[in-house]
Image: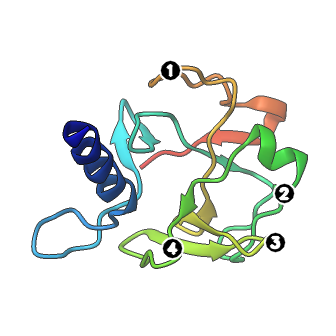
Amino acid sequence: MRRLLIVLALASLAACSTYDGLMGTPAAPAKAMDGALTNSAGMTLYTFDKDAAGSGKSVCNGPCATNWPPLMAAADAKATGDYSIITRDDGGKQWAYKGKPLYLWVKDTKPGDKTGDGFNNAWRVARP
C-alpha cells in the first residue's frame, strides 16, 4: 500500500509539473524527436492549416477536437520561448508553437507515428 501511494504521488507531481527542475525554469511543453515536435510521451504533434498563426484561437473544436486532441496546458502554465498558450472555446488552455495551436492525432498509436501528416491536406507535423 505504501509503495502504491508513493508511485501515485510521484505520478501526480510529474503530471502537474510545468518546470524542468533546474532553477525553476518553465519546461517546454514539447520536445523535438526525429525532426518533429512530440509531447512528453513521444507522440507526434500537429498543426492545423485553418488555425491562423498568432490569432490566439483554435478552430478545431467539438468532433474535430475528438479526432485531434489539443495539447492542453495546465491552468497555471506559463508561456516560454516559442511556446504560447491560447484559450479554447470551452475555456481550456492549449499550447501553441510559434503561434500555431498544437494537437495530437487519435490514429497515431505509438511514439514516432506520423499518420496524420497531410491528412485532408490541412494537418501538418509540427516541426521545430
Label 4, label 3: how far apart the Cα atoms are: 16 Å
What residue do we see at 56% from left, 64% from top?
Answer: 96
Label 1, label 4: how far apart the Cα atoms are: 26 Å
Tell me the number on the disc at residue 59.
none
Number of other residues with Cα within 10 Å of mark 1, as a class: few under 14, some 14 to 19, many 20 or more: few
Picture coordinates of residue 12, whole percent (x, y): 36, 54
* Element class at badge 3: loop
> Residue 83 appears in which quarter of the rendering?
bottom left
Label 2, label 4: how far apart the Cα atoms are: 19 Å
Observer-nearest residue: 79 or 20? 20
Picture coordinates of residue 111, whole percent (x, y): 45, 25
Tell me the number on the disc at residue 84.
4
Whichever of callouts 2 and 1 sits on the residue coming sooner in the sequence is 2
Foreground disc of the pair 4, 3: 3
Looking at the image, is 30 positioned above or below residue 67? below
Q: Find out whether the residues at labels 2 and 4 contact each other: C-beta distance under 8 Å.
A: no
Tell me the number on the disc at residue 61.
2
What residue do we see at 67% from left, 35% from top?
Answer: 105
Label 2, label 1: how far apart the Cα atoms are: 24 Å
Residue type at the position of mark 2: Asn
Picture coordinates of residue 116, whole percent (x, y): 68, 29
Tell me the number on the disc at residue 110.
1
Q: Find out whether the residues at labels 1 and 3 contact each other: C-beta distance under 8 Å.
A: no
Foreground disc of the pair 2, 4: 2
